[in-house]
Amino acid sequence: MKILVLNCGSSSIKYQLFTMGNRKVIAKGGIEKLGLKGSFLKHDPGGDRQVVFEGEILDHKSGVEYILGVLTSEKYGCLKSLEELDAVGHRVVHGGEYFSASELITDEVIDALTKCADLAPLHNPPNLKGIQAMEELIPGIPQVGVFDTAFHQTMDPVAYMYGIPYVLYKKYGIRRYGFHGTSHRYVTSRACEILNREYNSQKIISCHLGNGASVAAVKNGQSIDTSMGFTPLEGLIMGTRCGDLDVGAAMYIMEKEAIGLKSASVLFNKHSGMLGMTGISSDMREIEIAAGGGNERARLGLEIYNYKIKKYIGSYIAAMGGLDILVFTGGIGENGDETRFEILKEMEFLGISVDDGKNKGLRGREQVISKDDSPVTVVVIPTDEELMIALDTEKIVSKKG
Amino acid sequence: MASEIIYESIEDFGLIRKDKSRTLFSKIGIIGCGLVGQNVARVASTYGIEVVFIEISEEKIKEAYVNLGKVLDHRIEHWGLTSSEKRSILSRIKGSMDYADLAGCDFVIEAIRAVDRGARLKERKGIFRKIEEVVDQDCIIATNSTTIVITELSSELRHRERCVSLHFFVSSPEARVIEVVKGLYTSDAAYEKVCKFVNMINRKIIPVAESAGLVSIRLFVVLLNEACEEMMEGVSTVEDIDETMRIGLGMRMGPFEVADIMGLDKVVMWMENIYSEFGDVRYKPSPYIKRLVRAKQFGVSSGKGFYRYDHEGNRLLAGSTNC
């Protein structure tokens, strides 16, 4: 079975083509600057060459059309015809309360997605455009939506309600949704797979630490809490996002700096986080170098970053009544051995004891980094959201077929 | 990492073969990069559109860049923008003295500032003709002028059906509305294209019939004249009138503040144009404004108008000028 995974953004489309038998990616690439001047499609047909297709790509429909054109082309393609393609899986950012699992795209699903567009105005509309383009180009091809929020729909109201008037939840759906769901689901289930544990009996905390970052508590195979909330702004300190912040402080800043909603959004989403605290960069490596060179703000920034994650881990252990597996993923989670070390130190009393030898220097590879006798198993798992989307798509399409 | 990169043209790889297509409004032109021109350039570039502006000297081009940078820096200081966004906005804006650089534009807007009406109309007509020489037949040619009717301006063009008038608000560049005027000759296709452009830069269209002063300027000049009357009669002061309108009537700025930003020389010109069109004395410039203009007190741009300003354009608290 061959499955195409699409991630349609407002001015980009990323794609990966999988053969499901061996779970291999046979081609991947992406379009950038969609609808803008200088748009191009970068295609990686495997091997040691890359092809850049230059030219105007007007909209999502022509973008998807060119991707299919390249994939079926004699020169660079790997499909003889479009009939070889069995299904398409789409990454969809916000499924609201409508979707608690991946879903075969039908008219009803499209209706529900349209209703969620308000919740993710930057992301959902392009996701929808990709789905519609595919339906027009290959009518009838099975398409599956895989939602960033779906995994966290198992959260209890205890975890997802905010302390604000209930009427706002009813009126606008103001509650915590959580994101990175596909990644948390993939790494937690993958961890159980390689550790040979029963997914539905484990208490797992998964730390997805990338430019955006979130922690999720997964108990018996279900997400029971996560650090991102109504938007991806809540929770951990991120590259340029502030994470948890007193609403009172936000209001005070807006008044003192005489700024409106738009500037406030830029302030908390783009000027804050590690970049804002350290004044150096949103890139963890640069901050680590600066801290190594004696930069005090960089050192403090790293400490704050780690402390926050430690606090979330502690609170989720309390929420789940224990912990079996702790997973690190995302760019920083997979590669940042110092970050992992700092977060996990002095947690032996909670059953977390890290093997420094295994942790040090470990980058981007699946490996257990806790000591053999550590009650909690700590493991690094590189995330693979595209594969998860492909697997979901395969499952749903096979069931239907 | 791939070691070899091959370049291809994407048009050869569509499922349906098609001719080379062009993204609508991937590039626009602006004639005159004063306050209005800079605003248009900045807004369009923010939405990913390439901008070419034409100025009369290297000095003016440099000045426009400096001012653009200042406005963006100000936005960064107030958290509304990041430095990388500033860099990409500026990188899409190109200044030139050569009309030939407008070739390939989907839309060109004239935003020059000239002082007396006769020369101004003639000059603008000349500019329209020069634009027409270099752009494609379907390129929209627009003016930001509010008191000169587009039909008159476009009358000498070969393809006058593509002319429209758009009014960007100078006193509040972030205002999400633009007045759009269809001239006598303007085709529906051209009008629709302009609407598309306005939507692309995330503004709302206010359709306005061809009429001197459009909606905004015609109303504003009467308000300003009346405010001057009140002040001259001693009914109230400049500050108090502005504050009344701001707080009492919920305007973002009072009439004197707005006039100082627009430039009193420009306001007088508008008033005279509208007066000559309608012949009603309520449009005739108040003697007080004329007095200020004669004394070269144009407002923010000259450091003095109804209020005083420092060289950065910040209002000084000293109060109104008395002349």
Image (tube, rainbow, N blue to C red):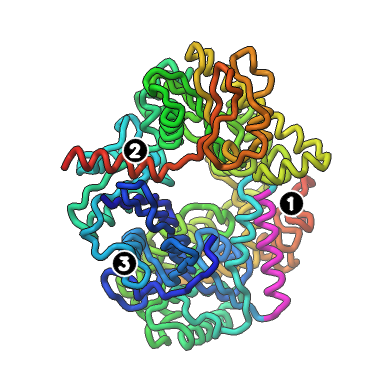
Q: Secondary structure at mark 2?
A: helix
Q: Which residue is mark 1?
A: B314
Q: Are labels 1 and 2 assigned to the same chain?
A: no
Regarding residue B214, the answer to whether it shows in the image is no
Q: Residue at x 41, y 77 (%)?
A: B139
Q: Position of residue A224 (x, y in %)?
A: 43, 21
Asked if residue B277 lies left or right of residue B35, the reply is left
Q: Amino acid at mark 3?
A: Gly
Q: Amino acid at mark 2?
A: Cys
SS class, disc 1? loop
Residue that numbered label 2 is attached to: A116
Q: Nearer the viewer, mark 1 or mark 2?
A: 2
Q: Mark 1 is on which residue type? A: Asn
Q: Which residue is mark 3?
A: A69
At 49% from the left and 75% from the top, the residue drawn is B108
Front residue (pair B13, A350) = A350
